[in-house]
Image (cartoon, rainbow, N blue to C red):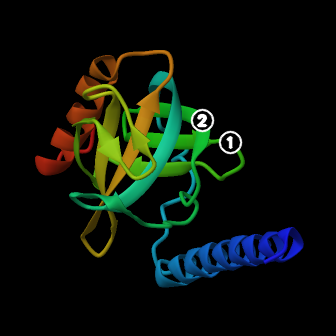
Amino acid sequence: MTRELAGLIMAAVAVALLLAMFFAWRARLRRDSALTAPIGVPEHADVTARHEILYVSTTKHDEPLERLTVSPLAYRARGELVLTDRGAALSLDGAPTVFLSSQRLAAADRATVTIDRVVEPEGLIRLVWRVADGVLVDSYLRPTAADPQQILPELQRLCAASENGVNP
């Protein structure tokens, strides 16, 4: 086998792998096309805190390695977590602002692992919320300027308001 033939075989294998990844991602987008996050912050929501974050992923509930492509949360991004008296907003670079009202929030805790990311123990925030018809999903956030423990009490208060039927 000549060097040129070996190079062509390697290039063909690389192209085949890239095409397989492309078509697999397109299939995942089609599979999850019905899942959308709520867009826009309510007019009279009072901001209580802002935190810079890295949005990592959204996965099936309690399955941190099974990514969902919930629109517009399909891709990792830098952004800001804005906590309000009515819920939490994810203002991510290049995407419309997603607002998770306290009625949608089910839980907030710490995590270490999710798809594409392993961090120090409990370095991620896992936000459990209802995407539609009671379907729970987990969104993972990595604070860039604060410790997750500083953000969790406020998120847990918003989740507790949902459980108690109270609208803060």
Q: Among all residues in the image, which is located at the extreme front?
A: 1
| Residue 79: % across, % down | 60, 35
Q: Which residue is mark 2?
A: 79
| Residue 46: % across, % down | 46, 30
Q: Among all residues in the image, which is located at the extreme right?
A: 4
| Residue 151: % across, % down | 33, 23
Q: Amino acid type of disc 2? A: Gly
User: What residue do we see at 41% from left, 56% from top?
Assistant: 58
User: What residue do we see at 44% from left, 32% from top?
Assistant: 142
Specify the label residue 113 is tagged with.
none
Q: Amino acid type of disc 1? A: Asp
Between the C-alphas of marks 2 and 1, the distance is 6 Å
Whether residue 83 is visible here, answered yes or no, is no
Specify the label residue 93 is tagged with.
1
Please say if 114 is above or below 60.
Answer: above
Q: Which quadrant holds residue 16?
A: bottom right
User: What residue do we see at 47% from left, 37% from top?
Assistant: 45
Please say if 29 is above or below 53.
Answer: below
Q: Nearer the viewer, residue 100 or 25?
A: 25
Q: Quadrant of the N terminus?
A: bottom right
Q: Badge 2 local density, few (<14 within 10 Å), some, or many (20+)? A: many
Please say if 93 is above or below 131.
Answer: above
- Kindly state the secondary structure of the residue where label 1 is placed: loop
